[in-house]
Amino acid sequence: MSWSLARKVSAALIAILVCTMMVTALFGFFKFQDVMSELVRSRYSFVAFTIKQKVEDSLNLGFALRQLRQVQETIELEKARDEQVQGIEIFDAKGEILFNSDRGRIGASVPENWLLPLSAASLQPFAVLDEDSNVVGLPLVNNLGKVEGAVVLLYPTGYVERELGPMLWRLAGEIAGLVGVFSLLTVMVASVALGAVRQRLHVMEHALLLASGGEAPLADTAAVDEFDGHFGEFVAKTREAVEHIKASTDEVERLDRLA
Amino acid sequence: MKSNALTGLREGAMRLDSSRSLLIRLLMLAVLVLVPPMVIGSYRALDNFKRGLGPEMDLKAAAIARDLVAQLERAVGFGIPVDKLVGVDEFFAQVLSANPEIRYLGITDAKGDILFLRGALSEQLNDAYRGRSGRALDDSGLKANIADFVDLALPVHVRDVPVAQVHVGFDQDYVAAQLFGIFYDIAVVLVVSLIIAFEVLLFVVVFNVSGPMKLVAEVVAHARRGDFTRVPGITSADEVGHFVRIFNSAMRQVDGAYRGLMAYIDEVRSGHFDREVAGQVSEIADRVRFLFRFHPSGAPLVLREKLSSDVRLPLFLFIFAEELSRAFMPLYAQALPSPAGWLLTPELLIALPIAVFMAGIAVGSLWAGAVTERLGSRKVFQFGLAPAVLGCVMSGLAHGVIELSLWRGIAGLGYALVTVACQSYISKTTVDSNRATGLGSYVGAVLTAAICGTVAGGVLAERIGFGPTFFVSTALILVSGWLLSHLLAVVDHGAPVAAPVPSGRPLLRIFANWRFTVLVLFAAIPAKMALTGYFFFLVPLTLWNSDHSLAELARIMVLYPLVMLAVSSQSTRLADQMGWRIGQVALGGLIGGAGILSMLAFDGTLPLVIGIVCLGVSHGMSASPQLAAIPDICWIECNRHGRTQVLALLRTLERVGSVIGPLLAAAFLLHWGVKGAVIGLGAVVLAMAAIFAMVAGAYGSGPHLETEEDVP
Amino acid sequence: MIMRRLLLGAVLSAVLVPAALVPAPAWAESPARSPAKPYRIYMALWRGWEDAAQGFKDYFTNQNIPVELIIRDAGQDRAKLPEFVAEAKQLGVDLVFTWGTTVTVDMLGTYDKVDPAKHITDIPAVFAIVSQPVGAKVVPDLASSGRNIAGTSYLVPMDTQVNLLQSYRPVRKLGMVYNPLEKNSLVAADELRELGRKNGYELAVAPVDVVDGKPVVESIARKVRDLKQDGVDFLYIPPDTFLNVNRDVLTGAALAEKMPSFAAAENPVLSSKAMFGGVYRYYTVGQLTAYKAEQILVHKKAPADLPIDPPRRLSIIINMPVVRALEFYPPMGLLSLAEVVDNGAEVRQ
């Protein structure tokens, strides 16, 4: 395949188009994911917050965290309400799980890094990333101001992708189609836009071929006014040179033969 | 299409050896193929995203509604009648402020009459609620579209008797509006793409069409006068290549005929016994030689001229890569761990990478000038690429500020070598008549790259982080390097131009020329101090502290190259017409200093925007007149040492300002805080500009040497 | 001679029989990771086992901290306190807990007058239910005791009380019935009047009648009526011993006059007809005191480094039957924070 001008221009433009669309699509996707996961996170934080309030109300009555048996029911109810929730856990300040929507996990320990937010002075909500779960958590504080533990809610990472995967793929397909259509358009329009160049080069080539062939009348070729009209002069001069040299050769030949 | 081409032919609207008309066509094509897919794609994406968010919004609303219902059921369960609830408004206000996507919250009684409502007007909802009165809701509630809202209603029960309904209204457009935040990013990407498309197309056109055709034109210009000594040496597979082959075959046909004739004549002359014939034949040879000229070596000389604009795209990419980190360099330094010690205060450490980068450039360009003379642009360029790539990739991997500064210094060295190599390439490939165009192309590439790099860097860093942005830079530098090493092929670097090794001492006597000294001290140096201390260092820090995102920050900072680009083209013309160069330099300095000091008058982002615009105006106004004034005020020195040497000295000296700028700003920052540092630096710049303005009046008086020499 | 008996983990009656010194089985379930010897704490009480002591004890149980409590009750008899000091020293306990101002001052001394012979100095101590730790010279400053003791405060600051009251409903005229013979109530009246100037309410006071140096119970209802006629819209019930004893009379009168009432102590709300109140519960204060003890015993903090502070969260108690009778409903925000007393019954007016 030869690289015609139109192809070169199209290739450059299509490369830029593809890059641009890819960058835009990625930015758009990231932004969407940001907004979406923020929304998901805020919802689960809210759920965790309602549990935190219930637990802290009980703590204020002087109950110990591990005594709050009714909390187990609360978290099982919340878990049952949303199938996306992987689990809700309440663990004490040492990391021992006291309540868990999955009863089998009660008594186990949470990963070390879940305890770090609890030691911080601020009692802010925290979010950590587990292997395949997002974790939103809130510290549980008793009325002495002491962190008794935390409630955490786990939901799958890739939640956005899983929920909206088909939609995103469809969208990606649409955009790819768009790129395809416009690539074709680029090829066509580039060939049109460069047609003039091709045309003129062709006219000049034609003039040159005629000139060197020496058959055409000069008037035709002189009309090509490329390069400030110099091309015509050039063609004429070339023809003149060819003819002159030919004449000279003939003359030399004649002289040579004279001998 | 044919008619189109013919019109072109007739009117001469398009010239193949000039890139302009063809480029305009292709740019229109670029806009046509880039803008619509972006617009359509963004629109489709937004639409899809909006619908994708819907179910999640429902869930959020349901979670909130359930909690409200629980609290209401508790209150009502205590025997508080629903219509007698107290403090509902404040209670709702708290929930609304914590969940901005929720537009309103309300309670209706069993009949559907609104008892409490916050966030919407009851007229908007009354009819819809009344219309469905009497309908019992199950626990999953009822979702309905009311006007612009989506309304979720859940029942409140007391002892299994429904007594009220809680309404949570949300606004799907709220979250969609958040998605619109991406709009600016997309606009930036589009603009940058268009500029890159322009640069690439310019390159394609120049490299494939107008460049070769210029060469053909040169050959044609000679050949039409009968001079067939050279042919264009172009080998490409496209239409131009095809044309050139035919063109060359025509040329070679002539040449071949000539060679054949000459050989024949020689044969006749040497082999013929008849003297007279030999004489006649010689006459014929002389006549042909008189009428036409052919190359004496036996074949036409193959022309392979390189064009100064070849270097534009790689240069653009290189500067683009370097400018990516512009908007966030101090923030990156701030984010890295710093071993603050006795002398190295945290403020100073943030300024250090910029200062060291500038120092690297200063050292690099001092040295690069001399090296380029000896080795040629290509070698220097390749030589400079190594530190540029190394500095860039390691900046992205740096673990501390000191380390980062080190790598920035090395990157600065590379930057200097590469840019000097490009500049010298341009002056080598141009002759005096078109050197101005060549340098204009250089400045154009640098400024457009600065525009693109600054905004793209901000957007990119916000999405992928500081470190990875440096890797993108590195990739771009490598692409630019690959292009350049292909293009900067053999350039004849003729005899070293009088080997002007900066013969230090005599040149230093230039400081005796007070006009030069004053120009350096009070115009050139403060201009650079403002650029590096204020624009590169304090502006990003201040904007960042006032909670602007990186992308916003970059969009504000891009004003500088934009304004500068706009102003400089006008001011050069103005300077040439009015010959008011020193005045322009003085005025520019004052505008810049005053702009920075607008911090005194305003709060927030506005003074920074004013400062950046003023700085753009200031530098756009004074940069080229400052250089152009040199031959006027240093006529003797220019004659003695060469203008290039004097200009190089000025460049080197002003870089002292580049290094001082961020360090001075950091010192101010330590003592007076961010605002104080801006004001302090502005005051210094304004004071120096004021001194220059006062002295500038004296430039015209006293022994003054006018020259007719003009600087391109 | 002090008798000793086994201390059971179960909640003890308020009246305490001096106990035998045997390790309690309550922490037998404590995990194997702390096989260490239990910490020995000497608890000196003033009027028997009540909520603060229970909270103190429960805290250790809940936190799985093994302790051995040596419980002594002075039975409001000051003369017993020197014996306690001597016993604590002789037993060489790890920590001493003192209940109330009298026990604390007598056993620990005031900061300007400490006698190592008469007071406990070498053993760290925590105190609870001391109404004026600074005023009683137990500590020079609430930020630090400056000596080997730590403690908690339990009175809700007056401005907190006023804010809470105002958050129920803004009040224009606040009424207060009090016993003029109790100094605490006089101080409270002054503070309320002062805060009223800032918070935009007026204070109307009605001291109960005093006959033969004794407050007259029968005058209470009349005083409440007077206040009502004076235009008072909210009644403040001070932490007054006389009124505490006669709380049913006072709160009943307020209810009869349809006047909402706020109590600074928990009893009028929990076991009478005051409408709501904001208090630090003794139980919570006891837990907080145990938390301080934990800091000293387990985390080896110097007592002087621990501030003397009240619990973080106020207990807001709302008496729902009274609210319903008055039809004076609490705001939703307050309700969601409050503990509600509601036996489901309606109260008689």
Image (cartoon, coloured by chain):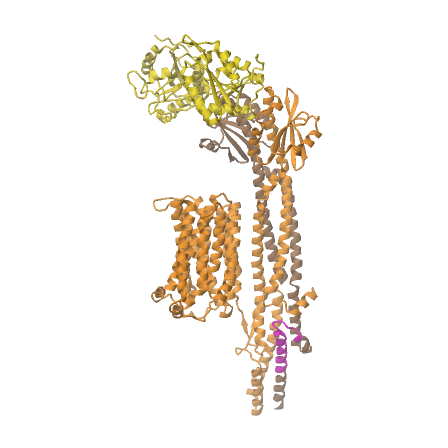
Chain colours: A brown, B orange, C yellow
A18 lies left or right of B429: right
Residue A239 forms part of the magenta stretch: yes
* B421 to A156, vertically: above or below: below
Quadrant location, the N terminus of chain B: bottom right
Could you say which quadrant of the image residue C44 lies in? top left
Q: Position of residue A131 (x, y in %)?
A: 53, 36
B544 lies left or right of A22: left
* A55 to B190, vertically: above or below: above
B333 lies left or right of C78: right
Is residue B455 or residue B694 the one in the foreground?
Answer: B694
Residue A51 forms part of the magenta stretch: no
Is residue B226 or residue A246 the one in the foreground?
Answer: B226
Task: Examine the rendering and report whether any part of residue C157 can be seen.
Answer: no
**At 57% across and 34% down in the image, what residue appears?**
B99
**At 58% across and 60% down in the image, what residue appears?**
B201
* B340 to C33, vertically: above or below: below
Q: Position of residue B425 (x, y in %)?
A: 48, 65
**At 51% across and 23% down in the image, what residue appears?**
C172
Is residue B624 or residue B310 the one in the foreground?
Answer: B624
Predominant SS along the magenta part: helix
Task: Examine the rendering and report whether any part of residue B60 can be seen.
Answer: yes
Q: Position of residue B500 (x, y in %)?
A: 39, 68
* A38 to C142, vertically: above or below: below
Q: Position of residue C202 (x, y in %)?
A: 48, 23
Write down the region rendered in magenta.
A221-245
Residue found at the far front of this picture? C230
Q: How many marks?
A: 0
Is residue B582 or residue B64 the one in the foreground?
Answer: B582
